[in-house]
Amino acid sequence: MEIKSMYFKANAKTKLADVALQGNLENARGRFVTTRAEAIKELDDFEGTRDAAEAIRNRVIDNLDLWLERFEHKALDTGAKVLWAKDGAEVCRLVIEIAKRHDVKKVTKSKSMLSEEAGLNQALEAAGIQPVETDLGEYILQVDNNEPPSHIIAPAVHKGLNDVADLFHKVHGTPRKTDIPALTREAREVLRQHFLSAEMGLSGGNFLVAETGSVALVTNEGNGRMVTTMPRVHVVITGIEKVIPTLEDLSTLMRVLPRSATGQSISNYFSILTGVKKPEEHDGPEHLYFVLVDSGRADVVGSDFHAMLRCIRCGACMNHCPVYQTIGGHAYGWVYPGPMGSVLTPLYAGMENSIDLPHAATLCNQCGIVCPVKIPLPDLLRKLREKQTERGLRPLTERIGLRLWAWVAQQPRLYALGARIGARYLKWLAGGTDRIRLLPTAPEWSLGRDFPAPEGKTFRELYAARKHQAKETP
Amino acid sequence: MNSREDILGRVRNGLQRNGSNAAVGREEMQSSLSSRTQGPKPVFDSEPKALLERFRLKSEKQSSTVDIVAQESDVPTAINRYLTAMNLPKSAVAWPSLAALDWALAGLVVEARGARDADLVGITGCFCAVAETGSLMLCSSAATPSSVSLLPETHIAVVPAARIVPYMEDAWALARTELGSLPRAVNFISGPSRTGDIELTIVLGAHGPYRVHLVIVEN
């Protein structure tokens, strides 16, 4: 997917002014936060389960090469084929090769963020193969001129009922409906025909189980089951970091994933798929391929951002992020929005293309608190800010400003004089009150809040005065 | 260099892989594969009666409906009762493993095979059921095709009470003992298919069944 994160500030501004979007975001905010809070109460030891989930993910990523070899070995044993892709272009090439080998004209897809990363739909179309998104949200976006998703769990969360009503009326040529169940049925009927006629199904993978060589899929709509049951070929596209050890580990992770994502105790369907159908079986694919994708992940192993590889893509960090809640997912400009996206986009799509993202955070740590695998997201964002400075990626004015500051801070007398002037100036600005309404030096900062006014004297002045007083009193 | 070697090579570099830490890593891997450590689980009463009650409550919370019958021979009549009450057709596709039940006697036309698009009612059994979350565990095979619980608008599942286990971990243990290796598809099903993709409003019946009805067999 083409990266647009460099336009973050301008895009965020547009999104803030979009009244319809603001309404849709407010609706989402309430639901995601409340349902998760309710769902985690069902676990007697949610924190203990989080610790266990973190340990499971660490166990794998700390020895990722060994676990990948182990998974590959088991998957081959089940009759699956395992392919490796360095980047999005290789993902596209491999999938098109598989499609051609099996004479595929149509591909039904269940949600795969990696296929978004790779821009797979466009590549398939260019190769004369029809891709059909079947997750309702993804389908809505595909028929709306391939609009990118704005959330990893609820891809069309930025759209309202009326948008979907207009869209289906236009695309399906049916009378306009504003009833959500009726719209859902309409999509069901259109997509059912695709499920039955596609020769190939394509899915992501929530987890790869090393013990059994299986892929685990967490879904609600049943489209994940359709694309992995009806077509003759099933292709799984997953990141190399998705391996977990055992089925027991899968159970532990399933206690935190749906709860963190949608506030469900368990998703409607949880499918563990292993190998291909046996000759006597009625359904299931005859061919199963795993495409294990790097696309920047291998270089994160062992780096300062290693912990990010624990991510299980639940979306809780964005649902609880005050910045995401206010601007939505599109402003972030790439596949992954919110705090996890602000870490992943610089790592996978280039730090120089996403300068503003690590700063699009208040570092309030809401994301860190809700993360089911305890990724220290604010620490990682701060580390990315450091890297930007190290690599000289910050704007010239900021670099000059900081250098000036560093110089002044090393001159105690000059610093004290500056602080004295500053404190008095700010007191004067407050005009006898304890608040400053508008800071002339930073008008944007004080646009939505007041600046607390200083008392007029600096800490050093007060300290010296007190020391003097102590000397006077015996 | 092929992509596999390139990717694994960079992962090894990142981990500063050498002979000795590889040996330690392999040992850790073997131990976690054989120890199968379990995480914390919610605590509840696992007496058979309590399990059945929890499974029923959790299933209803997932929008399934539940009927309880005394023995397996009561199943066809119970299903007929449900189909009548719901004003649904009396013909269905069922798992071949359920072919021996006397469907005709209860006034139902049941074909034992994999499902087709036109089938409106699908009847399955289950490998076991999980009380923690109110989930059915279905394992695919020639006698238990996965399409029967997926294509029809109504899914009816027969659940022997003795097959209700407390946790998903218990289901894995059963699968290892009884099946050896995993079948092609294991599906945990918790209520009818649903979507929240339009304004986060939950709608039942996305691409799979609109309704799931469970007939629990006590004996």
Image (cartoon, coloured by chain):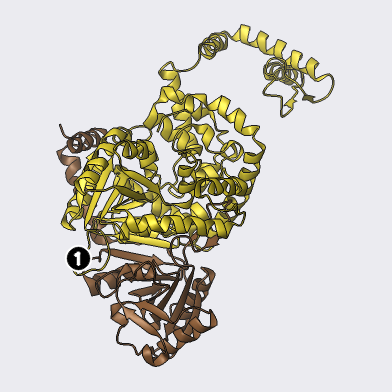
Residue A388: image x %, image y %? 44, 21
Q: Is residue A68 left or right of residue B74?
A: left
Give the amino acid at mark 1. Answer: Lys
Residue A222: image x %, image y %? 42, 60
Q: Quadrant of the N terminus of chain A?
A: top left
Residue A394: image x %, image y %? 48, 17
Decide: few, some or many residues near mark 1? Use Cα within 10 Å; few <14, some 14-19, many ≥20: some
- Residue at the spot 26% in from the left edge and 75% down from the top edge: B143
Residue A108: image x %, image y %? 35, 51
Note whether residue A235 is visible: yes
Q: Is residue A196 above or below residue A163?
A: below
Rendering colour (chain B)? brown
Q: In this view, does A265 lie to the left or right of A412?
A: left
Q: Nearer the viewer, residue B70 or B29?
A: B70
Q: Is residue A467 left or right of residue A95?
A: right
Note whether residue A48 is visible: no
Which residue carries the number 1 mark? Answer: A278
Tell which chain the image draws in yellow.
A
- Callout count: 1
- Residue at the spot 62% in from the left edge and 45% down from the top edge: A24
Q: Which chain carries label 1?
A: A
Q: Is residue A245 above or below residue B116?
A: above
Q: Quadrant of residue A120?
A: top left
Q: Nearer the viewer, residue A20 or A27?
A: A20
Q: Is residue B1 left or right of residue A42?
A: left
- Residue at the spot 66% in from the left edge and 32% down from the top edge: A17
Residue projecting furthest to the bottom: B105
Q: Which of B185 and A213 is in front in this view?
A: B185
Judging from the image, what secondary structure is the residue with disc 1 in?
Answer: loop
Q: In which quarter of the image is the C terminus of chain A?
A: top right
Q: Which of A178 and A320 is in front in this view?
A: A178
